[in-house]
Amino acid sequence: MVEVVPFGHDKHPTVMLEGIKGLIYNPSRVRYPMVRLDWLKKPKGGTPPGVITVLSA
């Protein structure tokens, strides 16, 4: 990404748009969609709230 340009009709574009450039390929960004492993095993059941599960790509 070279440049971020605000929407032309936005009278007050946010200065935060400049920060977007550094986030596109940031190592902290999730690169691929993820699904809970438990959901893959039981798509209609799932894990009760508050239970930590392992993520699988």
Image: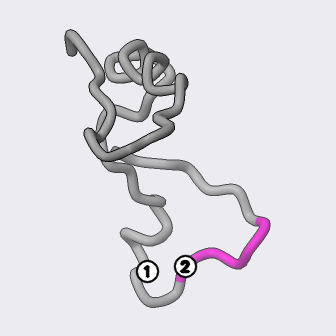
Tell me: residue 46, above or below residue 12: below
Residue at the image position 53 percent from the left and 25 percent from the top: 16
Front residue (pair 48, 13) = 13
Count of marks overlaid on the render: 2
Q: Residues within 10 Å of mark 2 (few under 14, many from 20)?
A: few
Most prominent secondary structure in the magenta stretch? loop
Q: Residue furthest left?
A: 2
- Residue 36: percent from the left, percent from the top? 47, 60
Front residue (pair 39, 20) = 20
Tell me: residue 55, above or below residue 29: below
Determine which residue is flagged by label 1. 42
Residue at the image position 27 percent from the left and 26 percent from the top: 5
Say whether residue 44 is left or right of residue 8: right
Amino acid identity at mark 2:
Gly
Question: Which stretch appears magenta?
Answer: 46-50
What is the basis of the colouring in this image?
one colour
Q: Residues within 10 Å of mark 1 (few under 14, many from 20)?
A: few
Answer with the quarter of the image where residue 7 lies. Answer: top left
Name the quadrant of the N terminus. Answer: top left
- Residue 24: percent from the left, percent from the top? 34, 23
Amino acid identity at mark 1:
Lys
Query: Mark 2 near mark 1, Cβ–Cβ under 8 Å?
Result: yes
Residue at the image position 63 percent from the left and 75 percent from the top: 47
Say whether residue 46 is left or right of residue 31: right
Q: Residue furthest bottom?
A: 44
Say whether residue 47 is left or right of residue 30: right
Q: Secondary structure at mark 2?
A: loop
Q: Secondary structure at mark 1?
A: loop
* Magenta stretch encompasses residue 11: no
Determine which residue is flagged by label 2. 46
Spatial separation of the CA atoms under disc 2 and disc 1:
6 Å
Residue at the image position 52 percent from the left and 87 percent from the top: 45
